[in-house]
Image: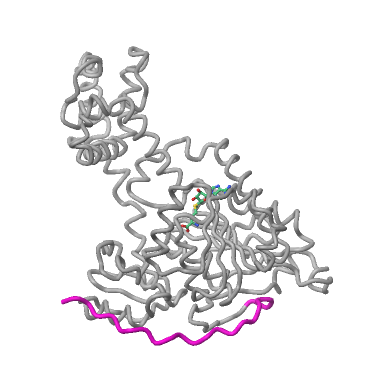
């Protein structure tokens, strides 16, 4: 995710610098309108990025115009061939119009080659049939503000049709129109057809529901810290998992949330306020530099680490058309996994931490099983992996003996974004017979965490989880849909 927005931002910035004053007239009075135009232009250009690259390559435009950069060339060629015909003046227009007939011929040849007659058909094969369309809209009920039953009632009174609780992933596939269903794994998760947009819905704007992919709900759900406990969210912004943790804690306890990015933290502050989170302490700090020996963290027993990753698991129409070769280059994956390993080792260094959940929205083994395998190897004496949700259909790759104790998620297998989760658990102290077994022998008998309901109705609790009684839910005021 981060990588996609990073690239969008960097392209926007590069475009802003090079083009803003010429391609779009950025006057102060029309600033917001023009920023919208600029954004639309960037998005449209990104949509055709692959085609533009091909055309620019086949015409050798950059060789002929040495000062022209690829990102700027893409926008100019987009505007010439697919947009409004290069409205800017000055050098840019002169440069690109010199090549107009060459570029138009290249476009015509490409259409013949692809056997399409319309420009938009050039991108159809890539953008349509998007996996994103197969991932339903997941709605997490914010138990800090309301209850699942009240939200179900509200939606029903608002014209939605409730289909009860799903019994298989298949049940989530065939929702249509205004139907919705309760998820089979997470009791506070409601599932709607992917076409439903709830961003303007009262329940969302008032913070009663959070629009969060099911896979992204797994880390906090599985960590499941008891009320009153001290928890670290190591790479927290924009805070979806932090607000989920706060809901599980019922705002009782302490939630230390760190992030390096001040802007993302600012957004997070607003989101947490809307979600009614009060038990958090936000810090704009590098988690790698947070002193695990600081007495402030001496009671931290639960830690969630969801570090920066390639974001390769996120499915969205726009991302699919912007993905390029660099996003999964070996160098980039190596840099990311090196940070992920360091962060995970640091997480395990907190003296009283019992459980550490590691998650990424990446599909790459380098960021998932490889990171877990290496870190586990270094900490075998004090940590082991928990067998997560045995009923979950898609497991971690079997590239090391405990790989399948971890979870994977994907649009095809679990109807979610691509995701990975592993949970480390501290060994309980002196050596037991369990610990003298080989990893594969131990695998069969490790503690298992299945669907542990946030309302406290654990189906199977981890054998070593601290036992803190959960209080019964307070009766919340009933919500009424307006009109
Ligand atoms: C995948 S995002 C986290 C998403 C978040 N857990 C959520 O659910 O909303 C990774 C975050 O890690 C932050 N980050 C990267 N390096 C960091 C570091 N060394 N210390 C703290 N945060 C870091 C990034 O700024 C980014 O916000």
Quick check: 226 above or below 137? below
- Give coordinates of residue 195: x percent, y percent: 26, 61
Quick check: 32 above or below 361? above
Q: Which residues are magenta?
A: 462-483
Closest to the observer: 8 or 283? 283
- Give coordinates of residue 201: x percent, y percent: 25, 67
- Give coordinates of residue 56: x percent, y percent: 32, 23
Q: Is residue 475 magenta?
A: yes
State which quadrant residue 17 falls in: top left
Closest to the observer: 413 or 288? 288
Going by the image, does 84 lie left or right of 384?
left
Closest to the observer: 310 or 40? 40
Residue at the image position 49 percent from the left and 63 percent from the top: 242
Main secondary structure found in the magenta portion:
loop
Quadrant of the drawing holding the C terminus: bottom left
Residue at the image position 42 percent from the left and 61 percent from the top: 416
Q: Is residue 321 magenta?
A: no
Closest to the observer: 64 or 43? 43
Quick check: 252 above or below 42? below
In this figure, which colouring scheme has been used for the structure?
one colour
- Give coordinates of residue 126: x percent, y percent: 32, 43
Residue at the image position 53 percent from the left and 64 percent from the top: 219
State which quadrant residue 150 falls in: bottom left
Going by the image, does 391 lie left or right of 51?
right
């Amino acid at each position: 995710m981060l990588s996609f927005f990073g690239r969008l931002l960097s392209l926007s910035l590069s475009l802003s610098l090079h083009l803003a004053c010429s391609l779009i007239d950025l006057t102060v009075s029309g600033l917001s309108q023009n920023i919208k135009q600029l954004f639309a232009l960037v998005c449209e250009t990104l949509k055709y990025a692959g085609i533009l690259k091909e055309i620019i390559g086949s015409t050798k435009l950059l060789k002929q115009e040495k000062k022209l950069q690829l990102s700027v060339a893409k926008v100019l060629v987009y505007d010439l061939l697919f947009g409004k015909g290069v409205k800017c003046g000055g050098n840019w227009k002169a440069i690109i119009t010199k090549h107009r007939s060459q570029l138009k011929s290249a476009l015509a040849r490409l259409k013949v080659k692809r056997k399409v007659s319309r420009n938009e058909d050039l991108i159809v094969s890539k953008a349509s049939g998007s996996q994103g369309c197969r991932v339903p809209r997941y709605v997490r009920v914010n138990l800090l503000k309301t209850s699942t039953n009240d939200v179900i009632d509200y939606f029903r009174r608002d014209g939605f049709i409730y289909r009860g609780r799903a019994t298989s992933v298949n049940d989530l596939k065939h929702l249509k129109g205004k139907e919705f269903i309760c998820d089979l794994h997470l009791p506070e998760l409601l599932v709607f057809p992917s076409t439903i947009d709830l961003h303007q819905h009262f329940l969302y704007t008032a913070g009663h529901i959070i629009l969060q992919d099911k896979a992204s709900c797994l880390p906090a759900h599985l960590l499941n810290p008891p009320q009153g406990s001290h928890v670290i969210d190591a790479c927290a912004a924009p805070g979806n998992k932090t607000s989920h943790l706060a809901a599980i804690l019922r705002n009782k306890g302490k939630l230390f949330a760190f992030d390096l990015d001040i802007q993302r933290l600012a957004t997070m502050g607003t989101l947490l306020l809307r979600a009614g989170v009060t038990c958090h302490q936000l810090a704009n700090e590098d988690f790698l530099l947070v002193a695990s020996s600081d007495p402030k963290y001496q009671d931290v027993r639960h830690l969630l680490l969801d570090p920066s990753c390639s974001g390769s698991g996120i499915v969205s129409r726009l991302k699919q058309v912007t993905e390029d070769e660099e996003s999964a280059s070996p160098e980039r994956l190596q840099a990311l996994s090196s940070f992920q390993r360091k962060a995970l080792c640091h997480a395990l260094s907190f003296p009283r931490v019992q459980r550490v959940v590691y998650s990424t929205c990446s599909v790459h083994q380098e960021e998932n099983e490889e990171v877990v395998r290496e870190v586990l190897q270094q900490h075998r004496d004090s940590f082991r992996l928990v067998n997560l949700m045995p009923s979950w259909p898609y497991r971690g790759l079997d590239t090391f003996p405990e790989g399948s104790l971890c979870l994977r998620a994907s649009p095809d297998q679990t109807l979610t974004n691509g995701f990975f989760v592993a949970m480390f658990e501290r060994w309980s102290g002196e050596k037991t017979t369990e610990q003298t077994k080989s990893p594969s022998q131990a695998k069969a008998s490790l503690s298992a965490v299945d669907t542990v309901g946030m309302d406290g109705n654990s189906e199977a609790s981890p054998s070593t989880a601290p036992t803190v009684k959960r209080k019964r839910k307070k009766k919340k005021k009933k919500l009424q849909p307006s009109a």
